[in-house]
Image (cartoon, rainbow, N blue to C red):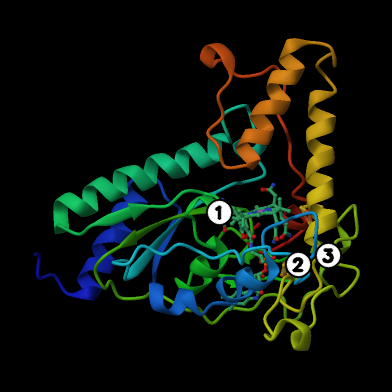
Amino acid sequence: MCSISSSALTAGIVEKARSLGAAIAGVASVKSLKGSPSHRIYPKIGMNLKTHGQDGKGDAKPDGVEWPADAVSAIVIGVEHNIEHPELDWWDGKGTSGNRILIRINNQLSEWIETAFSVKTHKLPYFVSKGGIFLKDAAVAAGLGCLGKNNLVITPGYGPRIRFRALLIDRQAEATGPLDFNPCEDCEQPCREACPVKSFKKTIYWADAWGQSTLPGTDGTYDRVICNRKMDKDIVDAVVTIPPGDDAHREVIRAIDDFEEGVAANLHGDKLPSCCVKYCRRCELACPVGK
Ligand code: B12
Ligand code: SF4
Ligand code: SF4
């Protein structure tokens, strides 16, 4: 076992992540994440994006994050998704090119950490139902930013225009957060006004009903059902460019469904489809921070 201090371990990992192409990187303790707002609400709220939460009826099994038993610290990396490069965020049949950059950095970082420090790593998938964690809470705990009124992590350097990925390690690395930063305090909230389907108009989640005061949209005013419906419409708008009777149409719809179920996209002939889904990000792009 390597006897490096927890602060030197963090410094080495953050520097390496940046040298591999991450815009920002930080460390959070797994213990703090297990008690973070999303990790606490998840077993109660569930992951069905067609409903606001589990209704307590029937025998729906509570959803839970599967933490590896040996996980002690979480490394969070962020890659900028600048408006100059909107294609980073477009679903192209094999996920998004931005996510592929994150996966590449995460894989290389994992290999380097294991070799340099003899530390075990767990590379986490995107979807929580497949073994992932809540990346926004992890980014906030790692001091990369704060949760904004648009329900996204706002970073000082890039605003919300950034995407995250994480690794777990079996060693204590010094936590880099939280950060004292709150740009929403004196802001007129153009992010909330920008939503084309009014996802931030009504309070959906109440502290007494859910047993916690930190909620979606920070104050319970974010409606995942109507936001998700807008995402579904973005898919329809994308595939409308391919004739409905066409094999390619069915193929693309199936690959998107697979992606949303957390299954790796598997298109015939390994080629990209002739359309891409440009998911809504208006609440993100309206935020002035980091521009
Ligand atoms: C499922 C999912 C969706 C679903 C459901 C979203 C939801 N919030 O329920 C849909 C498809 C609708 C969606 C939409 C979008 N998503 Co999305 N999504 C996810 C995913 C896979 C899980 C998120 C989730 O379910 N959270 C749990 C729910 C219950 O909580 P929540 O609504 O986020 O609310 C919690 C937080 O606000 C937190 N919180 C509030 N205040 C505070 C304060 C502190 C101090 C802390 C620690 C936490 C905290 O507590 C709340 C729970 O009580 C993550 C990836 C991941 N593995 O984390 C990406 C992720 C959150 N999505 C992301 C993005 C960018 C988007 C979109 C812009 C679409 C797009 N173009 O990519 C929109 C934005 C919607 C919005 N304004 O929130 C990014 C966010 C990046 C960022 N800068 O924050 C993530 C992290 C993916 C990534 N690779 O980086 N998404
Ligand atoms: S626009 Fe940005 S800074 Fe202003 S309230 Fe929204 S998230 Fe916060
Ligand atoms: S991603 Fe689009 S639909 Fe969802 S909350 Fe933001 S602006 Fe509204």
- The residue lying toward the viewer, choosing from 94 and 100, is 94
User: Does the numbered disc 3 mark a residue whose Cβ is under 8 Å from ligand 2?
Assistant: yes
Give how far apart the Cα atoms at labels 1 and 3 are.
Answer: 28 Å
Is disc 1 in contact with disc 3, using a CB cutoff of under 8 Å?
A: no
Horizontally, is 77 left or right of 240 in the view?
left
User: Which secondary structure lies at badge 1?
Assistant: helix
The type of residue carrying mark 2 is Gly
> Residue drawn 86% across and 57% down?
194
Nearest-to-viewer mark from 2 and 3: 2
Among the two numbered marks 2 and 3 on one chain, the one whose residue lies closer to the N terminus: 2
Label number found at residue 250: none
Tell me residue 234's x, y (percent). 81, 38
Is 241 situated left or right of 36 in this image?
Answer: right
Counting every numbered tag in the picture gives 3
Work out whether mark 2 precedes mark 1 in sequence or the reverse, and give the earlier one: 2
Residue 266 point in image, percent of width and height = 55, 24
- How far across and how far down the image is residue 247, in percent? 74, 11
Circle 3 residue = 192
Ranked by sequence position, the earlier of labels 1 and 3 is 1
Where residue 97 appears, as percent x and y from the top left, is 55, 34
Question: Is the CB of the residue bearing disc 2 within 8 angstroms of ligand 1?
Answer: no
**Is any atom of residue 36 visible in this view?**
yes
The amino acid beneath tag 3 is Arg
* Quarter occupied by residue 2: bottom left
In this rendering, position of residue 95 left or right of residue 213 = left
* Mark 1 neighbour class, 10 Å CA radius: few under 14, some 14 to 19, many 20 or more: some
* Mark sitting on residue 129: 1
Distance of label 2 from label 1 (alpha carbons): 16 Å
Kindly identify the amino acid type of the residue bearing the numbered disc 1.
Ser
Q: Visible in this render: residue 87?
A: no
Quadrant in which the C terminus is drawn: bottom right
Task: Give the residue pinned by disc 2.
Answer: 53
